[in-house]
Image: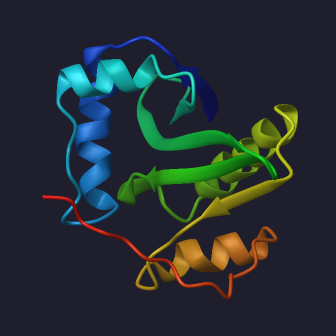
Amino acid sequence: MKIERVENFSKKVFNAVLRLLPQLASDVTLPTENFFEDFLKSKNSFFFIAKHDDGEIIGILTIGIYNIPSGTKVWIEDVVIDETERGKGYGKELVLFAICYAKSIGAKKIGLTSSPIRVAANKLYQKLGFVKSETNVYKYLLK
């Protein structure tokens, strides 16, 4: 498996995102081509794909970075390994890559969220050293 950062729009990557994101959650909002292209140009978001040697995209991961007075914060988002490829260690490899990437940019802390129904993902994060936070996460839906 190869992991690479994607900075330029391509139909192949966009179609992989459209295929993989619904595997994360059934109610996920899929991006438009324009949104995805703009997202790839963002200076605070880094998008990675995992692919086989033959070029087949089997996973995605996004790193969001922001600076606040207490330091550089990194969030891992939208981690998806294709359901046909799960259980082969690709998710672990992708998350370990993200951890190394976060260290390389000077982050001291990485956050992520995972739905409790994603049992395997939650076990993986804990196995890799992520600690379940004792904080409340709130969301406010804007209409």
Is residue 9 shown above or below 27?
A: above
Outermost residue toward the bottom in this view: 134
Q: Position of residue 11 (x, y in %)?
A: 25, 17
Quadrant for the N terminus in the image: top right
* Quadrant where the C terminus is found in the figure: bottom left
Q: Specify whether 47 is left or right of 9.
A: right
Q: Quadrant of residue 112?
A: bottom right
The residue most toward the left is 143
Residue nearer the viewer, 81 or 132 = 132
Q: Residue at x 31, y 69 (%)?
A: 140
Instruction: Determine the image quadrant of residue 110.
Output: bottom right
Q: Residue at x 30, y 50 (%)?
A: 21
Residue 41, relative to residue 24: is it above or below?
above
Q: Residue at x 23, y 58 (%)?
A: 28
Residue 139, horizontal then vertical, whole percent: 37, 71
Asked where in the image residue 92 lies, by quadrant, the reply is: bottom right
Where is residue 95? Give x, y as percent: 67, 52
Residue 76 at x, y percent in the picture = 59, 52
Camera-side residue of 65 and 124: 65
Identify the residue shown where x is 75% and y is 71%: 130
- Closer to the camera in the image, 24 or 137: 137
